[in-house]
Structure formats: C-alpha cells, structure tokens
Image (cartoon, coloured by chain):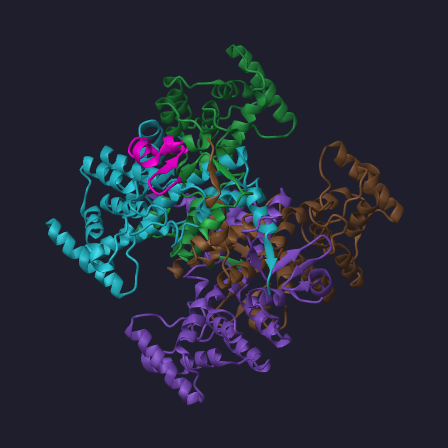
Chain colours: A brown, B purple, C green, D cyan
Amino acid sequence: MAAELNANPGLRFPTGLGTSDAETISLLGQDLAADLMGKVGFGELAFWLVAGRRPSPGEVRLFEAVLVALADHGFTPTAIAARLTYLSAPDSLQGALAAGLLGGGSRFLGVTEDCGRFLAGVLSTVPETDADYDLLALRAVQEAKAAKRFVPGLGHPVHKEQDPRTPVLIAIATEEGLYGPHLRLFEAIGRVHPQVLHRRLPLNGAGVCGAALADLGLPVDLLRGFALLARAAGLLGQIAEERRRPIADQIYRTVDRNAVYEP
Amino acid sequence: MAAELNANPGLRFPTGLGTSDAETISLLGQDLAADLMGKVGFGELAFWLVAGRRPSPGEVRLFEAVLVALADHGFTPTAIAARLTYLSAPDSLQGALAAGLLGGGSRFLGVTEDCGRFLAGVLSTVPETDADYDLLALRAVQEAKAAKRFVPGLGHPVHKEQDPRTPVLIAIATEEGLYGPHLRLFEAIGRVHPQVLHRRLPLNGAGVCGAALADLGLPVDLLRGFALLARAAGLLGQIAEERRRPIADQIYRTVDRNAVYEP
Amino acid sequence: MAAELNANPGLRFPTGLGTSDAETISLLGQDLAADLMGKVGFGELAFWLVAGRRPSPGEVRLFEAVLVALADHGFTPTAIAARLTYLSAPDSLQGALAAGLLGGGSRFLGVTEDCGRFLAGVLSTVPETDADYDLLALRAVQEAKAAKRFVPGLGHPVHKEQDPRTPVLIAIATEEGLYGPHLRLFEAIGRVHPQVLHRRLPLNGAGVCGAALADLGLPVDLLRGFALLARAAGLLGQIAEERRRPIADQIYRTVDRNAVYEP
Amino acid sequence: MAAELNANPGLRFPTGLGTSDAETISLLGQDLAADLMGKVGFGELAFWLVAGRRPSPGEVRLFEAVLVALADHGFTPTAIAARLTYLSAPDSLQGALAAGLLGGGSRFLGVTEDCGRFLAGVLSTVPETDADYDLLALRAVQEAKAAKRFVPGLGHPVHKEQDPRTPVLIAIATEEGLYGPHLRLFEAIGRVHPQVLHRRLPLNGAGVCGAALADLGLPVDLLRGFALLARAAGLLGQIAEERRRPIADQIYRTVDRNAVYEP
C-alpha cells in the first residue's frame, strides 16, 4: 500500500520538522542522532522547533529560566484536575496530563500570552528613552482603564508587594544581553501605573515571562504554548507525587461528603 | 473565605512540590527565584520533579538526549491529530496540544514504557557477566515468544537494519558512566534474539530510550510521561508550523473528497 | 476518614444535580431509579440537566431533532482526529473521544453557538411584525458587514443553494409551537441579506440549530455544549466504524508517505 | 484543489456513516433531513451509529434507561475535574468537557465495560436453566477469587445493601422482552457469590448497565463509550451549574489553603 501511496502525484505535505528514511532521521534539517542527541538540550530543541531557528546559549538560559518559572505553582486547579483524572483513570497517564493542560486557558495560564500580546500591541513604534517608554506605558494603562480592561501582568493574589520571579528574570535577561523593548515597556508599566490606577500593583511572574518570551522573538500567538510545555513537566511531577503519596481521593471525598442538595 | 478555610482542622494536603507565601515561591524545597531560575535547566527540573532528586550533570545529558530523541517523529498520527484539532479550534492551543498527547498510548508512544517495564521485569536478579546477560535475554525472548508476545523495543517499520538513535544513546550513557543493567540487557537481547526469532531485528530508538530512563532510576510506570513531555515540544513545533504553512485543511479535504459510501 | 470529613463545618458544596445515600440516588430532585429510569428519555434528561427544568414533549422533539442534525457530518477534521487517536492509543477510548471533541471550537462546531449568540444580541427588543423583523435583520447584517464580520449561520461550502436541515427544523419548531423570535429573525436574515451582501447565501444547518436552541430558552453560552453532546454520539459511531473497518492507518500513511522536506 | 483531490485515484476512504452532496446529507444510508430529524430520537441515533442497525422501540427504552442511569453521579472526581478546568479556561467549554471525560477510565466509569466483558467471557456457552446459570456463575466467581480478581459489578461504596438502579433496569429489560443471558448470569452471580466470598454484596448499577448493554447486542469493547456519552450529558449539567452557582474556586482554595509542605 505504501508503494501506491508513494506514487500519489496530487499530494504533497511539506514540513521543515521531522522526516526519515531507512538509515537516518532528520529533524529541523539536522541528523537527529549525529547532530542533536547529546549535543542540544531539550529546552534548546523546543525553542528551535517553534521558532525555526537555533537559539544562542544566552537565549537558551533565559528561555529555560522562563520554563522553570512556569513549571509548577502548587495545587492549582489544573494540578488538582490532573490528579483527580489520574485517580479515575490510572491506566491512562496521557489522559491525566491532557486534563491538566486543558485548564491552560484564558484565566490561569493565559496571562503569559496575554501580557506578551498586550506589550507587542502597544509597541507599534519602539521608543528610545526611558521617558518615552514611560509615556507609552502611561497611555497604554490609561486606555486599558478607559476600556475597563485589566493590564495583563499586573497584580497577584498572593505576592501583593513583589513577585520574586520578576526581578530575577529581568536580571537574567540583562546579563544575557536580551533585555529588549517588551521587558522595558513592562518595567515602565510598573513605574507609571499608580498614576492611573491609584495603587501600586506588583509586576507578576507570568507577565514578566510573557515579556521575556516576546523579547526572545517568539511568536506572540504561541506564548501560551510555552506555558503549557513548562506545565507539562510540573503536571508530571504532580502525577508522580500522586502515585507516591495520593491526595486526590481525599479531595474527592472532601467535596462529596460536604455536598448539600439545593434545588 | 480563605481565613475560614485556613482554619480547617480536618484537612491536610501534603506536597513536596510547590508552595508559596507573600514573599517567596518554593519548589522542591528550593527558593524558585533565587535557587532555580537561571541556575537549573528545564530538563533538569523535569527530572527532579518526577524523581524527587536532583540529577547529576551526566544524568541530565543522558535524560535530555532521550527527550530530544523522542520529541518529533514527523507526521505521526498524533501530530496529524494535533494539526486537525488546531484547524477546527484555533482559539484553543491547549486543546490541540492535548489532542496530540492523547494519542500517546499503547501503540505509538507506549514502546518506551513497555520496554523499560519489560527489562525491569526480567531483571529480578542482576547478572554479572555478558554471558549471564545473554542467558537471561535468551530466556526472556523465549518466554515472550511462547506467550505470543512481542519483545518491546525490537523492530522498526522504517529502520529495518539499524535505528540510528540506538548506538548514539548507548554511547552517551557509556560516556557518562550511566550504562546500567537495563541497557546491558537490551543489548543482550539485540545479540541473542535471532537464535529464537530466526531473523535479526534492530533495537529501536523508543526501546533504547526506555532502557536508558530505567537505568537513570526513573519509575518504570512513569516512563510514558517522559515520552509525552518530549512529544509536547514536538507538537508545539507541529502547531507552529501549521500556523506558518498549513496542511491540515489539505489533509481533511484529501480524506473528505475521497470518502466513499459503503453500507 | 469519611466521618471526619462529614463533620467539616466550614465546607459546603451546594448542588441541585445528583446526590445519594445508602438507599436512594437523587438526580435533579427526582428519585433516579423510581422516577427517571425508563420514564425520561436521554435527550430529555440532557435538556433538564442543563436548563434546570423539565422540557415538554414538543421541546424534547425539537431538541432531539437538533442533536440528530449535529451528530455526524462525515469525515470532519474532528472525526479524523478521533480515529487517528484511536489508532495510536486503542486502549483509551475516552482519549479518542476527547480528542475528537477538542476540535469543537470556534471554527467547526462553533457556528451553532455563534449564531444563537448573534441572534440573541440583536433581539434586545422583540419585534412584532415580519416587516419589523426584516428591518431588524437588515440593520444587523449591515452592521456586521460594516464591521467586516461574517453573519453566523449564513453560507455553506457544500450546500450552496439550500441546506436541507434548515426548512425541516423550522417546520418541526412550527409544528410544536416553538417557532420563536430567534428562528423568526434568522429567517428574516435569510430574506434580507442579499440587499446588503449582493448575493444569496443559504441559511445553514448549524445556524438554524443555534436559533432553535435559543428559542428553547437554553443558555446562549452553553449552546456549543449541545453541539458537543451530539458530536459525542457521532464520534462513537466513527470509532465503532474504525474498529470494524479501519482507515486511520491509511490516512496516516497517505500523509507520511507524501511528506516533503522543505526548510 | 478539491477537483485535483477528487481525481485522486489511489485513495478511497469507505464509510457507512455520513456523506453529503449539494442537495442532501446522508447518515447511515438515510436522508438526514427527511428521514431522521424529528423522526428518530437522539438515543436511538446513538445506538444506530454504534451498532450499525436501528434499534426497536423496546431496545431504545432500555438503552436510554441505561444512559439515564449513568449520566450523573454527583461530585465524582470527573465532575470536579471538569469544573476546575472550566474555572481555569472558561473560554473553552470543549476543554472542560474533555477533561471530565478523560477520567472515564478503568476505575470510575470502567465498571460498565468490565462487567459486560466479564459476563460475555463467561458465556462461551449459554446455559438453559436457572440452575445451570447458578453453576456457571459459581465457577466464574470461584475463578475470579482464585485469581485474586474482583468480580466486576459486585459491591458499592454507598449502596451497601442494594443499588436501587439494579432491580429497575432488570424490570425494564423484562418488560421489553430483552432480559437475556448477560442479565441472567449477572443475577445468578448475585445469588451465588456469598457461597464463595462469604458475604453478600449488592449488584451495582454500573454493572447491571453493562449486562443490559451486552444483552442489547452492543459490542463489548465499546460499552465504555456509552458510559462516556451518558456522562457527557451529566458533565454539561455540572458545567451549567458551575456557571450559575460556582464552587470550583472554593474547591481549589480548600486544597490550596490546606497544603502542607512535606519533603
């Protein structure tokens, strides 16, 4: 059957990712076994796969710092959903992981992408001085307020003063020469927003990750994808812990035993 | 409400993963911002999250080589499913990723886990010499044949002579001092199986990855999880390419236009 | 442990759906075994579960006609994704079904919800005469055109003249006394849109289903849910057929064998 | 492009489900609009799609009674997972539904399929008298005990004396002339198991549903699919209630606020 299909003249599915023949496996135009395995890190490969270009060592360091920052946030709704799914269907690890990732939508994991997109939208022209950045930031916060929209990346339910991830990621970007317009605008928002909102909110970790990924040149519409990749590692950690020290059944019972019928 | 719930005396959900308070975020008992971001790689963190211990640099190299080997295999059924889901629901990147991962079951991604489990099952006692390994391998292949079961990790539809990933991963494990009983038994199976099966099959890449992960001391029941993590990166690459150069609509039309009604 | 948790004074999870004790199972305030099983149809129960009220027999007939209309549309991208996932992970039927449903997003299954929401948005005041409906419809189509937005429910790639489901569903709604403002406005759009768009497009089946569900008083934000429920039945049919007469492997090979590397 | 693909001579994807042309939509060889909509119920269609034959009215009644019995069991782990996913990603209803269904694996929803398969496996020959059924049942329970396996469908954590669904479903099957060998064997197991297990366990609702579906001639390997379809309706009810009266955030906080770090 393969032979017939090979001959199919009207069909052509182009790809720049993986192909193979009897002797070699190619990935991204490289020989997977000879050039990538043991020579390219996993985060480096993930960047390369999405961006279509190999990152520099400094880019890899910043990128992996973002993934590390986003991997696990404790008992989030998505972590709990993955554990409960694993309890119900322990035979299907992929189902538990997928269930956890499906919570990676607008509310919890979406801030990274929302923030990157917001900053990119504001940066139609790139300012030169800090004062220009402040002016641009001020206008953006005012417009968001007028439209009754939140500024993505501002505020955190727990870290009310400062999110500890924010200065660290900015420092890494600076060290690696990757502190670009998105991070700079994000910091300007941090300086000017109290003039508009009349209170000081922290720049949160999910937001700074979005700014850093945008400064790395990654496509804004796929930033959520990196949050999901990071979270995949965190969810595996949650599932591994669920196997060693289960709590999902206790969570289920806590809800079920305290259910109250109300029409 | 949080205050009430804080006081809830009957409830206690232990975790060794992530926790946080107003100033710090902890992960695996470390200060996430101060000790992990920029200092620990993403693959290293994924290993640590699942295994509960920090891997050595050599272990990270072997582990990431496995992830790189498993990240993308071209137009697999799972890659196609992710692209088709993205075509239908482009607003939900997490759905396309989850759909792709859900194919990570017994047939395609399962070989890694099956092979690790098979080898671990055979290794109830660890042999000393190569000859002892060969004897153990011979018995294992004979038993599998008698039970009409395949030996996981043996054979490949495309790489009929040799899977190029296999010798490379064994070389990396050896370089890093991590060539252990699972890889050794796997190689023994490669030597002895023709005596039983009367033809020579290659040791495939998914199988050698399972053997290497088992030699890294990772829990056999979670090996599929690492294949899924690796594949998450590959699927993001597929979705990113689908955005730049779409083919899912052509795949859909190819099937739909050649549908034939047969009762 | 259950005893401790039962006593948990700070916790209370209200529900009007299912509860049970040692002797009875309640659902929607009814005795499941005595009052529902064998007495209430499955579509009827689905309506009741979402709307919180029991539908009349006429409402059930219209509602089930919608579900029947939406159940299967042949080799859609979602049907193909479900079959490919089943090929990869035949041990996990729930994964194949979930993968198929994950394509139920904005593009393919979303029209039903989009159309219901569009009509409900236009109907801030309910007109009295057909002429008033036409006026309202005209303004709505003009506004959509000015905003460069499609009018949901208008046009179909295959049924370019008329979608055969549309008149049938309108006839059923009329027979059952359930032809309400959403269907009436939808028909008005069918009459007036050529004045604005300068060509005649059919009112499609997904759109008329959305209008009918809205006339049934179902919550507009959940209309996609009914399309998903209908599709769940269709996907089970696809998976059942894939078991009897598999095609997923041929689809996979068709793509894989015609892959062309292009950087 | 369609024209090119239409001409594709090597490709042929047969289906007995849905096809369409410009004027008509066919489903199962019927005219969807003329013959199915408004004339065939949703449960009836679901049966037909999977079994490939139209059920009789009595079969529809029994089948829908099974779906009604399985639709919702209150705050199950899967219902909670769906609500938590909806909390995290309210923009993606399909993701919340899929997450809930992914828990439909071996432990919670699997009993229906396991029981049907167990009974079908025992019934290699169909007995004639009740005494013969008892003998067959006795041997099956003894073998399960010897193999340290549970008998699927036996026992329930809440309904310790009797599951109220069991006698009702058996009565419906009897009324409709559909009480067949699987239900009869299931009842025999209910009579004889105390001789082997030395305590009396109830025949549970999930089990009797599996027996009834098997007596309806539905393929044993797809019984889980019907439990999933039923549960899809229940999950929509849970999500609809979560919109009206949210509890997922309280569940999340209950877990998060009572998290305790333990290495």
In the rendered structure, does residue A232 fall within the stretch colored magenta? no
Q: Considering the image in quadrants, where does the C terminus of chain C appear?
A: bottom right
Query: Can residue C72 be seen by looking at this rendering?
Result: yes
Q: Residue at x 40, y 28 (%)?
A: C63
> Residue B124 placed where, x, y %?
40, 79
The answer to whether residue D188 is above or below residue D263 is above
**Left-right relation of C141 to B146:** right
Q: Quadrant of residue C166?
A: top left
The answer to whether residue B141 is above or below residue D153 is below
> Residue A114 placed where, x, y %?
68, 45
Q: Residue at x 54, y 75 (%)?
A: B169
In the rendered structure, does residue C44 fall within the stretch colored magenta? yes
The answer to whether residue D65 is above or below residue A90 is above
> Residue D32 placed where, x, y %?
35, 32
**Left-right relation of D125 to A52:** left
For the residue pair B248 and D230, the one nearer the viewer reads as: D230
Q: Which residues are magenta?
A: C20-47
Q: Quadrant of residue C135?
A: top right
> Residue C128 placed where, x, y %?
52, 10
Query: Can residue D222 be seen by looking at this rendering?
Result: no
For the residue pair C205 and A189, the one nearer the viewer reads as: A189
Q: Quadrant of residue C71?
A: top left
Q: Residue at x 69, y 46 (%)?
A: A157
**Left-right relation of D244 to B44:** left
